[in-house]
Amino acid sequence: MRIGGIDVESPLCLAPLAGITTLPVREFFSAHGASLTHTEMISCAGLIRDNAKTFDMLATSENEAPLVVQLFANDSGVLVSGGEVVRERCARFSAFGINMACPMPKITRNGSGAALLKKPEIAAEMVRGLKSLGLPVWVKIRRLEDDSDTLRFTAMLIDSGADNVCIHGRTCAQRYEGIADRHILSLAAKEFPGYVSASGDVKAVSDIQEYIAMGCCAVMIARGAFVNPFMFEEYGGQFRTRDEKLEELVKFAYNARTISGEHKALVLMKRFAGGILRFERGAAELRRLAMTARSLDEILNYLHFTAD
Ligand SMILES: Cc1cc2nc3c(=O)[nH]c(=O)nc-3n(C[C@H](O)[C@H](O)[C@H](O)COP(=O)(O)O)c2cc1C
């Protein structure tokens, strides 16, 4: 199937998650049913300034599903310059993403992220500018207080050339709390068939099914990917045994350490440990151990010992 100008195998995508959707995490979910993944949001100002840490975020590999490189900036010129750097330096990616959803003050203060929801002219110029680089453009927004404003903003993005608009059903004021509204997704999916993907409260296969039934062309799995890392596969009817799950976690740990180093690998393992054994024997014990572990080996030794 083709979504937002990209050939994909299913509508299940790994959402962009700052500090989390690094290369080893994307490789893990690509191998476990994500048909498309996102980078973390990447600062165009950082790319233009030659910031080494920002460049690290452009690392990709052939073990990944199609990738959307998500950028943020506060004007079209900076965004397009950032996009040009990505085109030069990023080995493999399928589309540009634009973050118009981040509600955190350190991002909105200078006019980036969700601040753009209040600046439709600049937002439109950004889409047109990035689109001129010749790749699909995916935009991520949030629900506005008023449904008709959300629909108007979405229409404006599509008219400007956006290939996909992901709507997170929480308003900026909600940040990441409370319930994500689904009604706006059903309205937008009906009004813009083939363009709207959904984000918000995807914690189980039934949530994915609900968004698809509404007509959303793709579903972004965010925090739910760590509530149940095997949700993507379970949507396709594939269920793993407890030992297989542990084996996959061990593989992830080694891969993350090789790519990102001990510290980042340990931080990511703490995230995975919460859900990897969901409803299986030893889940609580693994979670507890991971939370207090000071090294990756501490967790790995435990995992080798605990396998059946
Ligand atoms: C820790 C964290 C980091 C996030 N980083 C990004 C990001 O870089 N870009 C983005 O568009 N959304 C980001 N989001 C939003 C998620 O992609 C998603 O829209 C949101 O978590 C709602 O989905 P959920 O309720 O299923 O988690 C982030 C969310 C969290 C919790």
Image (cartoon, rainbow, N blue to C red):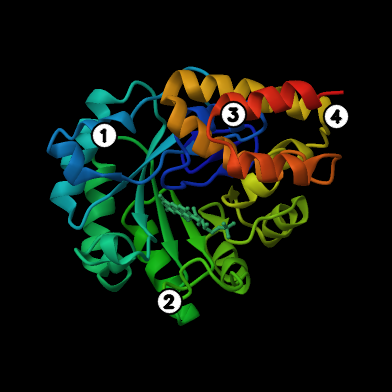
- How far apart marks 1 and 2 lie (CA) works out to 30 Å
Instruction: Tell me the kind of residue under disc 1.
Output: Lys
Looking at the rendering, in which quadrant would you find the N terminus? top right
- From mark 3 to mark 1, how far is it between C-alphas? 22 Å
User: Mark number for residue 173?
Assistant: 2
Q: Which mark is residue 241?
A: 4
Query: From mark 2 to mark 3, how far is it between C-alphas?
Result: 32 Å
Q: Note whether residue 111 is visible.
A: yes
Residue denoted by label 1 = 53
Gap in angstroms between the C-alphas marked 2 and 4: 41 Å
Q: Are marks 2 and 3 in contact (CB under 8 Å)?
A: no
Where disc 3 sits, the SS reads: helix
* Residue 28: numbered disc: 3
SS at mark 2 in the image: loop
Residue 133, visible in the rendered structure: no
Q: Earlier in the sequence, mark 4 or mark 3?
A: 3
In this rendering, the label closer to the viewer, 1 or 2: 1
Circles 2, 4 touching at the beta carbon (< 8 Å): no
x%, y% of residue 77? 13, 49
| Residue drawn at (82%, 39%) of the image | 282
In percent of width and height, residue 139 lies at 39, 53
Q: Earlier in the sequence, mark 2 or mark 4?
A: 2
Residue in the image at 58% along x and 66% along y = 185
Pointer 3: residues within 10 angstroms few (<14), some, or many (20+)?
many
State yes or no: discs 3 and 1 in contact (Cβ < 8 Å).
Answer: no
Given this view, does label 3 or label 1 mark the residue nearer the observer? 1
